Image: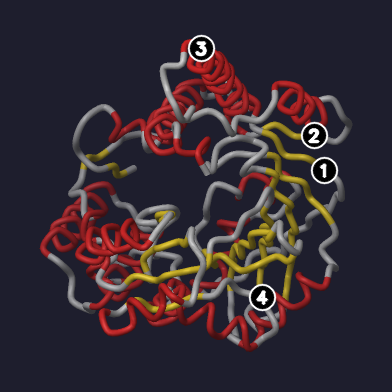
Amino acid sequence: MCVPPGNIFSKISCPASYSRYVNQTFFVENYFSDWGRSFYHKENTEKEERYLAQVLDICKRNAVNLIYPISDPAVYLFSKNIQRFNASGIEVPVPDYSKFIFIMDKFAITSLAEKSGITCPKTYLLKDDIFGKAASGLEFPVIIKPRFGMGTMGVNKCANEKELFVKHKSYAAKFNEMLLQEYIPSTGMIMINVYMDKESNPAAVFYYKLQRPDRRIFFVRMGAHELTDPDSALCRTTIGFLKSLKFQGFTNVQFRVDSRNNVPKLLEMNIKISGSAWMDMRLGMHRPLFNYDIYTGKDHAPNSYKYQKELFFLSPVEDAMIFLVYLFCWVLKYILRYCFLYKNNPFANLPAMKEMIGDYKSKYFRKNIEFNLYCTNFFKDPLVSIAAWIFYFYKLIKDDFPDSFVQ
């Protein structure tokens, strides 16, 4: 397994590197800082070249014949250099470079999705000559994010035009092209995992409702995933859109439900393996093997999966961390209120304790629940779980505290 060099978080950010099933961990060049800017260059950057040379050398010395990239930057880099690895007898199950770039282009995907009947937030490609015009076409707050991005990297909420100008100036140099997008107030999300076969027909569809933003406090990675009806109108429209693209392989399509009219609006598409793979695999759908067959032309036995409606997938340790932070903030809220230390209490929008407890009770005290792999496999491979929980808490505090309370 390869991880970037640096401090202790280099390995903690890759929890699998602590697994007792991993024979050896190699520290290689960190090329992630070139992510975004290098999208416009078919040629590799210097950091990317050093990384590729190191990986090829590791493969040669250790007789490695299969590499499975799992992050957006890794899928991008290997798809750009797939022939180089194939020439060395190394299989890399990634999509064609041009197809990957197209899927990662949030502006192009949004434009095409609208033509297929999918509701999307108002989106503008930010350029100097239309900056003011774009800003005037939306109400604040607004979202500014990279045209090509990964997760929440570079995604910012701007409360006014001055903040928008500052954020645009700061991030445009890192990502080249930025998008200005309508902010969608919401208390839930929808995630549709679609597996399209070699004829661009759906082999499997998993429809999840995510209850994770406002009520569950933080705009972060975890939350309650409820498996629901895969034959909904939204699923059919999404599948029709993918068929029009002649898409093959796995994709994760995310929607944010607009609380103003209860309409799901497209956020993005992802084609990496992603952290939700364990839920599909728990039901019998082997995502890595499916993609391997699609991208390498192999043909393993078809997946046999069982769809179970109203099944909840939960992350208890992560949820416990959120609740502990909530308690800390709840205490601070009343200290600041009664001591008059802050004129504007930053925790004024904190949900009531009764609401929080009720939310947790409704998820955990019910039938048909599944805990994530960090819990169920803790005693088999404890260091992986411990590293993942430490990194989750670090990201929780670093990226989401206390901003989530002042939305």
Q: Where is 211 relative to 343, above or below?
A: below
Residue type at the position of mark 2: Ile
Residue 383 vs residue 186, the one in the foreground: 186
Residue 387 vs residue 146, the one in the foreground: 146
Residue holding disc 4: 119
Q: Which label sits in the foreground, 4 or 1?
A: 4
Mark with earlier residue (3, 1)? 1
Mark with earlier residue (4, 1)? 4
Residue type at the position of mark 1: Leu
Residue holding disc 2: 369
Residue holding disc 1: 311
> From the viewer's perspective, is 364 left or right of 196?
right
Quick one: which residue is furthest to the left in this view?
46
Residue 335 numbered mark, or none: 3
For the point 47% across and 62% down, which residue is it?
142
Q: Where is 158 relative to 346, above or below?
A: below
Residue type at the position of mark 3: Ile
Q: Which label sits in the foreground, 2 or 3?
A: 3
Residue 237 vs residue 132, the one in the foreground: 132
Q: Where is 335 relative to 305, above or below?
A: above
> From the viewer's perspective, is 251 left or right of 210?
left
Residue 255 vs residue 186, the one in the foreground: 186
CA gap between label 2 and label 3 equals 37 Å
Residue 230 can be seen, yes or no: yes
Q: Where is 282 relative to 340, above or below?
A: below
Q: What colouring style does the render use?
A: secondary structure
Can you give x and y, in whole percent of width and height, for residue 247 in the image? 58, 80
